[in-house]
Image (cartoon, helix red, strand yellow):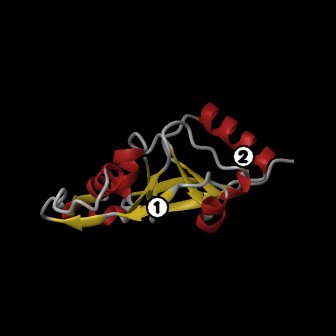
Amino acid sequence: MCAFGEVFNHELMWAHYADQFRGICITYDFFKLRHNLPAGTSFSRIYYNEEVPKVGLSKKQNHSEIAKTIFSYKNYRWLYEREWRMFANKGKVFYKLPLCVARVYIGSRVHKEQRSEIERRLGRLKIPCQIQKLDGYEMRFERVTKPK
């Protein structure tokens, strides 16, 4: 299981999932990603609700379907995440082409040395990246000049 969000510029997401703005956010071309993942990989949009899902009521559901149902629900307070879950067979899941990555956003608190290394590696793969800038309550992203 893997989680994806539809938004990249939400402060709480950066605080919760990117180590207080010290991480990165990878955006994918969803069409390319889906077509470059192993067979049997599926996605489910998260259902946000105040109640937990009801499972085990039907004998037609197998254990895998029940697990997907349970893992596809979150409390409605997390609605701002606009999350999807990816389900795949047990083990590591790789996509075939790096072109699945559309862009990488680098948090404003990433150390300069780490940022330079990320920019260098992404530049070799021709993956665009942007640096997060925080100014009071404003968040914006600036393009990284392409390495020569």
Density class for disc 2 (Cα within 10 Å; few <14, some 14-19, many ≥20) is some
Amino acid under label 2? Leu
Residue at position x 45%, y 65% in the image: 6
Residue at far top of view = 113
Say whether marks 2 and 1 touch (CB < 8 Å): no
Picture coordinates of residue 68, whole percent (x, y): 34, 55
Residue at far left of view = 51
Q: Is residue 104 visible?
A: yes
Q: Which residue is mark 2?
A: 122
Q: Nearer the viewer, residue 102 or 145?
A: 102
Task: Name which quarter of the figure residue 112 lies in.
Answer: top right
Judge left or right: residue 37 versus residue 78.
right
Mark 2 or mark 1, earlier in chain:
1
Q: Nearer the viewer, residue 68 or 60?
A: 60
Label 2: which secondary element:
helix
Residue at position x 62%, y 53% in the image: 37
Density class for disc 1 (Cα within 10 Å; few <14, some 14-19, many ≥20) is some
Residue at position x 67%, y 56% in the image: 36
Q: Nearer the viewer, residue 83 or 129?
A: 83
Q: Nearer the viewer, residue 22 or 103?
A: 103
User: Marks 2 and 1, how far apart in space?
Assistant: 26 Å
Picture coordinates of residue 11, whole percent (x, y): 37, 57
Task: Name which quarter of the figure residue 103 lies in.
Answer: bottom right
Residue at far front of view = 59
Residue at position x 45%, y 52% in the image: 87
Q: Which residue is mark 1?
A: 43
Judge left or right: residue 106 versus residue 47.
right
Q: Is residue 130 visible?
A: no
Picture coordinates of residue 110, whole percent (x, y): 53, 39
Amino acid under label 1? Phe
